[in-house]
Image (tube, rainbow, N blue to C red):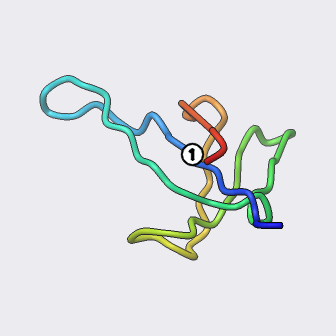
Amino acid sequence: MSDRKYLIESRRYVGDDGKIIFDKWVTSAKVIEVKHNDQYLVFYPLEGEHAGKKHYIPFTNIHVVKEL
């Protein structure tokens, strides 16, 4: 059975053109930790420039989480 992968998309900031710019990461269910009391999602991206580095995203900044 293959490991489940998820796309996490975050509302990051407003760009110079006034549009919201999103960051996207791919991670697996095995490297996601949900901090309910602190209202954070903690994960390690599997791909891209920041692969393997711990990321913290406040629940309020999460735009989309979907299974790939």
* Residue extending furthest toward the front: 1
* Image side of residue 28 versus residue 12, left or right: right
Image coordinates for residue 59, horizontal then vertical, percent: 66, 34
Asked where in the image residue 38 lies, by quadrant, the reply is: top right
Badge 1, how many Cα within 10 Å: few under 14, some, many 20+?
many
User: Which corner quadrant of the image does residue 29 belong to?
Assistant: bottom right
- Decide: is 22 above or below 20: below
Q: Quadrant of the N terminus?
A: bottom right
Callout 1 amino acid:
Ile
Residue in the picture at 70% in, 47% down: 41
Secondary structure beneath label 1: strand
Residue 49: x and y, percent?
Answer: 38, 71
Nearest to the observer: residue 63 or residue 68: 68
Q: Position of residue 21 (x, y in %)?
A: 31, 36
**Is the residue 33 above or below the residue 12 in the image?**
below
Residues 21 and 29: in front is 29
Residue designated by label 1: 8
